[in-house]
Image (tube, helix red, strand yellow):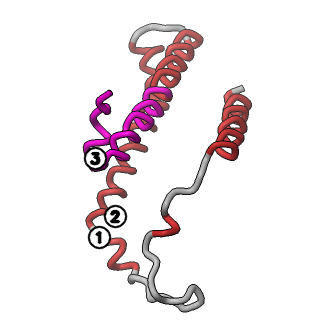
Amino acid sequence: MNFVLLAIVDFVWNALWLGFGREGDLGTQGKSAHSPNEAREGLPYRRILTDSSVLSIFLLCFASYWALGQSILWLPTYLERGLGFTNVDAGRWFAVVIGAASPINIGLAWLSQPMLQRGATTRHGAREAPSA
């Protein structure tokens, strides 16, 4: 049933994206005087993979997936064995946790957009709510 619900949510999300989504300004960034047919020299992978920003992203992704994996694998078990809930009740509470976290994450991302449009840095836009 989880896969069916996820497929439905994905279908609705894609329909909304196709209806309301738009491209950003990525196409205007980094244009040079070279013609599109000219091959541009790329950076060597060694330089890319040893860049501090790329290494930080790798570390943050590892930490976030580790935390996600821990919560998905161990929270239901903790609710059952540690707190004594039945497996059905543990599943329901786990659904409440996931159901609450998803809109909160989406809402925080939505709230940061006005800040970024007003010129706030991504560091500030990601942790402070915009003023009204």
- Measured from the top left, where is residue 123 in percent x and y? 27, 47
- Measured from the top left, where is residue 13 in percent x and y? 65, 38
Choose top left, top right, bottom left or bottom right for residue 8.
top right
Which of the pair 126/95 is nearer the observer?
126
Q: Is residue 70 magenta?
A: no
* Earlier sequence position, callout 3 versus callout 1: 1
Q: Are the two marked residues, 2 and 1, in contact with CB atoms closer than 8 angstroms?
A: yes
In the displayed structure, does residue 6 sit left or right of residue 50? Answer: right
Main secondary structure along the magenta-highlighted residues: helix
Q: Against 57, is 112 above or below?
A: above
2 vs 3, front mark: 3
Picture quarter with the C terminus = top left
Q: Residue at the location (39% across, 50% down)?
A: 61
Q: Secondary structure at mark 1?
A: loop
In the displayed structure, does residue 2 sit left or right of residue 31? Answer: right
> Could you tell me the amino acid type at mark 1?
Asp
Q: Which mark is residue 120?
A: 3
- Measured from the top left, where is residue 86 in percent x and y? 54, 8
- Measured from the top left, where is residue 131 in percent x and y? 29, 30
Q: Are the two marked residues, 3 and 1, in contact with CB atoms closer than 8 angstroms?
A: no
In the displayed structure, does residue 28 sit left or right of residue 52? Answer: right
Q: Residue at the location (34% across, 64% down)?
A: 54
Q: Gap between marks 3 and 1, in whole Å?
A: 25 Å
Q: Secondary structure at mark 2?
A: helix
The region drawn magenta spans 103-132
Give the residue at mark 2: 54
Q: Residues within 10 Å of mark 3 (few under 14, many from 20)?
A: some
> Could you tell me the amino acid type at mark 3?
Ala
